[in-house]
Amino acid sequence: MYLGRMVVHARTREPLALLRERDTDRCLVVSVRSPQAEVMVQGAMPERDDDHRLTQDLVADMAVALGRTLDHGSIDALVDSRFRAALVLDDGTRLAARPSDVLAVVVRDGLRLEVAADVLDTAGQSWSELDADRPEPARAAAEEVQALRQMLDDVTADDFRDP
């Protein structure tokens, strides 16, 4: 799966990650915390000095310091309406973590994301039914404003006369 889009829930104002399954219409909606959402939106970041590094910046370095590398992220289960996730090292060691942290590391480091089939069967949704392919509301509004400006630029007083 991959990050298809980040959205903000209209009522709660909480960031949501829409994870999309490759070559299908299925997606998974995962609530993420704001700092992780920011990392996910920004993607790969330039090196930061030690005073400004985020947890997501440290994880891969910590794995290397221990003689390992990060292999992928995984959403493994849905328990009491909460996703369970892990970062997986190259030797198969699984490090349990909050889903939003796993997603932030996966996006930041360009890692593969796996989602258990039973999780997708239980919580998966239709990408097209969510209308996730439509333009973002701000972009759609900007396009409407642009179209209106173009019409106003082209209109003359004669356009308003009765036929």
Image (cartoon, rainbow, N blue to C red):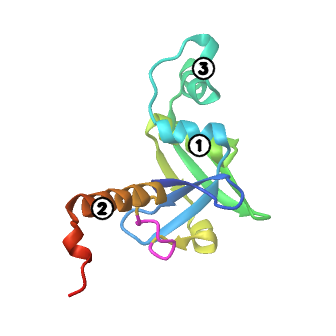
- Disc 1 crowd rating (10 Å Cα; few below 14, some 14-19, many 20+) is many
What's the magenta region? 128-134
User: CA gap, disc 1 to disc 3?
Assistant: 16 Å
17 or 156, nearer to the observer: 156
Q: Is residue 79 above or below residue 113?
A: below
Sooner in the amino-acid sequence: mark 1 or mark 2: 1
Distance from Cα at disc 3 to Cα at disc 2: 43 Å
The image's mark for residue 106 is none
Q: Which residue corresponds to mark 2?
A: 147
Q: Quadrant of residue 63?
A: top right
Q: Nearer the viewer, mark 3 or mark 2?
A: 2
Give left or right: position of 101 versus 90. right
Q: Is residue 87 visible?
A: no
Residue 7 image offset from top left, x and y in percent: 55, 55
Residue at label 3? 53
In the rendering, at what x and y percent does residue 138 appear?
46, 55
Considering only order in the chain, which callout, 2 or 3, is on the residue closer to the N terminus?
Answer: 3
Q: Nearer the viewer, mark 1 or mark 3?
A: 1
The amino acid type, in three-letter code, at marker 1 is: Ala
Give the residue at mark 1.
37
- Graded by Cα atoms within 10 Å as few (under 14), some (14 to 19) or many (20 or more), the crowding at tag 2 reads few
